[in-house]
Amino acid sequence: MPSVLIANLWLLLGGAATTVELSVASATLAALIGFALAVLQVFGGALLRGIAEVYVYFVRGVPLLVLLFAMYYMLPYSGIDLPPTLGGILVIALYFAAFMSEVFRGAILAVPRAQWDAGRGLGMRSRVLLSLVILPQALRLAAPPFVNTCVMLIKSTSLVSVIGLLELTLSGRQIVERTLAAFQIFGGVALIYFVLCYCLSLYARHLEKRLAYAH
């Protein structure tokens, strides 16, 4: 009955708030790490580029759930005991940083070579050329796939329920165990995830138009 969903909606919204907090913190950290990895892969020396590539290929080849289990069950044996919230943010951020690095790397490499040559022809130093010419164009190109990766990140936060974080999915499971109204509750959970992702997609469209006008 819809009344079951309405009666427990505040619990789902509480879980959704935790999901949003996890998503924002993880996406911000993942973007910073991913950008650093992309810069190392494009401009770093052979050693730094190799380290960045090994990290990217390894993390992309391991399921996020396995990394969460490793953080929660294996790290305590080495004397590192992270709180679930901090651990979840770090694992999600480190995981999606590998994907975001490829987004940023591809965007940097997609800037036409003529832009590099024109900047050097004007006597720009590498740092000035990157900050004023290359990176603004690269960020414009990276915006759509970056937002798409953030949408994937939001949905992947549901996996932190396995380490006991009371986010949206775990809140729904607990309500279902008490009410046995699986269809209504998980329907509400799906709707909330959809609203979060749809709002982010709308913002991405708006951002694309603004960047296009600015360009």
Image (cartoon, rainbow, N blue to C red):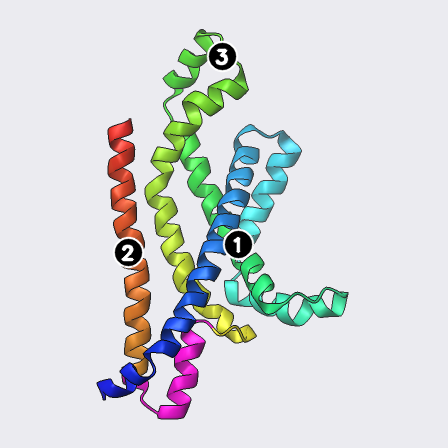
Residue closest to the eye, 38 or 213: 213
Residue closest to the eye, 129 or 196: 196
Residue mark closest to the camera, 1 vs 2: 2
Residue 182 lies within the magenta run: yes
Badge 2 marks a residue whose secondary structure is helix
- Mark 3: amino acid: Met
Residue furthest to the right: 79
Q: Is residue 10 above or below residue 78?
A: below
Residue 89 lies within the magenta run: no
Q: Name the residue under label 3.
A: 124
Q: Mark 2 points at which residue?
A: 199
Report if residue 65 is visible in the image.
Answer: yes
Tag 3 near tag 2, CB within 8 Å: no
Q: In this view, does 135 lie above or below 69?
A: above
**Callout 2: 10 Å neighbours few (<14), some, many (20+)?**
few
In the rendered image, residue 14, in percent from the top left (x then y), is placed at 41, 72
- Mark 2: amino acid: Cys
Q: In this view, does 91 lie above or below 190?
A: above
Q: Name the residue under label 1.
A: 93
The residue shown at (44%, 7%) is 122
The residue shown at (56%, 66%) is 85
